[in-house]
Image: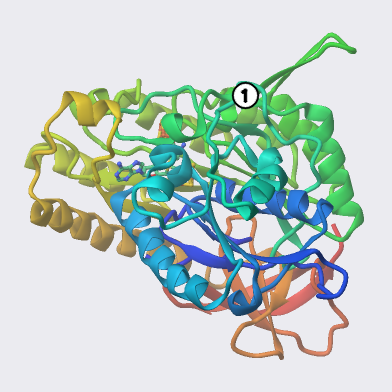
Amino acid sequence: MGMPELAGKIHDESRQGEAVAAFKHDPTTYKKLFYIESYGCAMNFADTEVVASILNTEGFGATRNVEEADLIFLNTCSIREKAEMTVRKRLTEFKLLKKKKTGMLIGMLGCMAERLKSKLLEEEKLVDMVVGPDAYRSLPALIKEAETGQKAVNVLLSREETYGDIAPIRLDSNGVCAFVSIMRGCNNMCSFCVVPFTRGRERSRDAHSIISEVIELFNTGYREVTLLGQNVDSYYWIDEQKDETVTFAKLLEKVAMVNPLLRVRFSTSHPKDITDEVLFTIARHENICNYIHLPVQSGSTRILQLMNRTYTREWYIGKVNRIREILPDCGLSTDMITGFCTETEEDHQDSYSLMEYCKYDLAYMYYYSERPGTLAEKRYEDDIPEEVKKRRLQEIIALHRIHSLESMQRDVHKTFKVLIEANSKKSETDWHGRTDHNKVVIFPKGDYQLQKGDYVQVKINRCTAGTLLGEIVGNQTA
Ligand code: SAM
Ligand code: SF4
Ligand code: F3S
C-alpha cells in the first residue's frame, strides 16, 4: 500500500512522516528548537499541529533538521505491532544522536506513550518525556521537569479535553487542505482495537470552535477541510445558548455553509452509526464530497460478532445499498482485516465476496496484529498462522487492485471538477489536484492563469492504477 500524503488520502496508519512546522524559525529569537515526527492516523497528524501550537506559544521554534534540535518528539501509534517497532527503531537512532549533543531531550507523544506509560523512560531509558494524547497542555511544564533531570510523565486521559481553543499550526501544509478534529476518543469496543485504551472516552468538540477554525482556514486560502474523528457519526454537542442539539449531520451542514467554495470531507464513519440524515445532507450540498470511508473489517457475520462491530454482513450491505440509493455517484472505501482469531477459509471467502459486491474505490487492508490489553487479546487465541494471515491479505489486495483499476478506468473520458492542490511532484509544468471522489489528477498547467486553491474542469484522457491524467477544459470558480 502506498504512503498517502499528509493532506491527501488518510487512514494509512503505516505511513510515517517528517512533520515540519510551516513557520520559519530564527534561532536567535526562539528559546529552543524542536523537531517532531508523526506516525499513525490523521488524528495523530492533527494532534501534532496542536502540539506545535502549544510549543510555539511557549517560545519554541520548529526545525526540520534533527541535528540542530534541542527537543525531539515522536508522535506515536500503537495500532499494530509493526507501527510500534518502527518507533522503537527510530528511538534507538535518536538515542545515538543524543549522546553527541548534551542537553538534547527526547519525548514520546501519542498512543504508544499512553499504552506503555513510563516503561520506555524507566526500564529502557529510551526517552526523557512521555506524554499521552490528552496531556499536551502540560508539555511546557514537562519540558522544564525533564531539563532538571526529573521523570516527566503525563498520561492522564481526560473526559473533556478537545483542544478546541488551540489554533493548530499547519504543518507541512499545501495551504489548500487541512484536517479539523471534531472529536476525540472512542466509545466503541472493537475487540481488536487499542484506540479506546490509548485515546480514552469519546468527546465532541464545541461546534462553535469547529466553525471558527473552518472560517479562519477558508479566509487564509484553504479550500478543503476533512472533519476527523474515530467515529464521526456519533458527534453530539449541545449548544446551550441556542438550546440546539448538533448532530454530525447538522455539523456537516454548518461546515458546508461556511462557503460553497470550501470542499468538505470527513472520516471515519462507522456502519452502525451513519444515518440517512448524513447521506441526505451530502446529497443537498454540492461542496460535501461524494465519498464515504466505511470500514467493514470482515465480510463474515461470525467474525464481525467476535470483533464486536455490532453489525452483520447483511446490515453492512444494506448500508452500502442505501448509500448508493441516496448518493448514486458516491465513492466508497473501506478497511479490512484478514486472519482475525478463528477466521476460517469460509469466513475469508465471505470477506472476499463482500469486496466483490462493494467494489471499493479504495481499501486499506491489514493482517490481524494482536494488541496487548484489547478484548480480543483477553478473550480469544490469536490462532491463525502468520503465513495464512498474509496469504489471505494478498488475496484481497489482488482483488482490490482489480476493483480500484476499474474504478479509475471508469473515469477516463469523463470531465471532473478538480481542486488544484500543488505542483505535480514530477513536473512544475503540471498541476496536482483531486476530484470530489478523492482521486488524484495530474494535468498540464497550459496557458491558464491558475493557482493552487482554484477549481478547474479537467477531462480525463487516461489513467494509471493510482492517478488520473487529463487536460483542462474550463475554469471554474464554484
Ligand atoms: N475508527 C475507525 C473504524 O472504526 O474503522 C478506524 C480505526 S483504526 C485507527 C484504523 C484501522 O486499523 C481499522 O479500521 C482496522 O482496519 C485497523 N486495525 C485496528 N486494529 C488492528 C489490529 N489489531 N490489527 C490489524 N489491523 C487493525
Ligand atoms: Fe477502534 Fe472500533 Fe473505535 Fe474504530 S470504532 S477506533 S476500530 S474501537
Ligand atoms: Fe494509531 Fe492512535 Fe491513530 S493507535 S491509528 S495513532 S488513534
Label 1, residues with CA under 10 Å away: few <14, some 14-19, many ≥20? many
User: In the current view of this chain or complex, which residue is farthest to the top?
Assistant: 243
Depth order, front residue of 300/83: 83
Q: Nearer the viewer, residue 8 or 143?
A: 143
Specify the quadrant that holds the N terminus.
bottom left
- Residue 258 vertical position relative to residue 197 in the rendered view, above or below: below
Residue at the disc numbered 1 = 203
Relative to residue 396, is residue 30 drawn left or right?
Answer: right
The answer to whether residue 179 is seen in the rendering is: no
State the image coordinates of residue 388 (x, y, percent, origin top left): 9, 52
Q: Quadrant of ligand 1?
A: top left
Q: Tag 1's secondary structure?
A: strand
Residue type, label 1:
Arg
Q: Disc 1 beta carbon < 8 A from ligand 2?
A: no
> Dividing the picture into quarters, in which one does residue 136 lie?
top right
Percent coordinates x, y for residue 471 in the rendering: 67, 81
How many numbered dots are placed on residues in this image?
Answer: 1
